[in-house]
Image: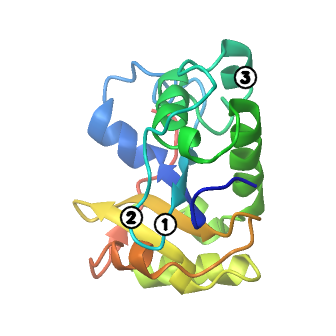
């Protein structure tokens, strides 16, 4: 599924951290409290063993039609983010918009998030290695070398999971090396404001 790159990275953003850092006033659908979001899809990124392509030429429009984008709101709650991901990453997948977002959804559906992470309490701290191990244990075929946890200010930001182009889990040393090196992290609770 796709061509012109080596593998995919599915980036899952922890919405409570993003909202606390970027939208405290709750102006976006992601943060306004009408719906509680935990992990949202930040993107599905074509990668090479070293580096990644971005903003590739495409026959498809830069604009993602509303009908296509709104069908993704359960996992990506923003047309702005959907459009940006298409322009920066989807255009490099070798797929058209509909196929790219179909693969993106299939990749997200492949990942099971353990309750220990999804329902974490900010008072409990977890190391990035513990998060990676929990994900590997919950997803047969996934190893800690195929997951990278990112962080900022000792809070969970994202989980990045590597897939082959056929959506099998795989190791990805360059992505893994870019993960969080903090000793432990807080995971802000996904609750309504």
| Spatial CA span between label 2 and label 1 | 5 Å
Mark 1 element type: loop
Most extreme residue toward the left is 153
Which residue is at a point 70% across and 63% down the rendered structure image?
165
* x and y percentages locating residue 6 in the rendered image: 58, 67
Say which quadrant the C terminus sits in. top left
Which residue is at a point 77% across and 41% down the rendered structure image?
102
Q: How packed is label 1: few (under 14 Cα within 10 Å), some, or many (20 or more)?
A: some
| Image quarter of residue 72 | top right
Does residue 25 appear in the picture of this structure? yes
| Spatial CA span between label 3 and label 1 | 27 Å
Say which quadrant the N terminus sits in. bottom right
- Residue beneath label 3, please? 68
Image height of 187 relative to 133, above or below: above
| Image quarter of residue 66 | top right
Image mark for residue 51: 2
| Spatial CA span between label 2 and label 3 | 29 Å
Q: How packed is label 3: few (under 14 Cα within 10 Å), some, or many (20 or more)?
A: some
Which residue is at a point 64% across and 78% down the rendered structure image?
170
Pointer 3 with pointer 1, Cβ within 8 A: no
Image height of 3 relative to 140, above or below: above
Which residue is at a point 43% across and 38% down the rendered structure image?
55
Earlier along the polypeptide chain: callout 3 or callout 1? 1
**Residue 82 falls left or right of residue 66:** left
Q: Nearer the viewer, mark 2 or mark 3?
A: 2
* x and y percentages locating residue 49 in the rendered image: 47, 73
* x and y percentages locating residue 30 in the rendered image: 50, 30
- Residue beneath label 1, please? 48
Mark 2 element type: loop
Image mark for residue 72: none
Mark 3 element type: helix
């Amino acid at each position: 599924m796709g061509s012109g790159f080596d593998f995919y990275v599915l980036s899952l953003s922890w919405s409570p951290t993003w909202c606390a850092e970027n939208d405290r006033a709750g102006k976006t659908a992601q943060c306004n409290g009408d719906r509680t979001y935990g992990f949202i899809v930040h993107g599905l990124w074509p990668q090479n063993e070293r580096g990644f392509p971005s903003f590739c030429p495409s026959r498809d429009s830069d604009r993602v039609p509303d009908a296509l984008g709104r069908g993704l709101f359960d996992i990506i709650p923003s047309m702005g983010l959907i459009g940006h991901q298409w322009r920066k990453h989807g255009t490099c997948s070798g797929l058209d918009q509909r196929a790219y977002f179909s693969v993106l959804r299939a990749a997200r559906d492949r990942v099971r998030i353990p309750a220990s992470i999804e329902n974490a309490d900010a008072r409990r701290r977890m190391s990035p290695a513990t998060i990676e191990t929990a994900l590997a244990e919950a997803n047969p075929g996934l190893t800690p070398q195929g997951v990278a946890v990112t962080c900022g200010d000792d809070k969970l930001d994202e989980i990045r999971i590597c897939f082959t182009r056929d959506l099998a889990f795989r190791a990805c040393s360059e992505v893994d090396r870019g993960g969080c090196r903090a000793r432990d992290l807080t995971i802000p609770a996904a609750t309504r404001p």
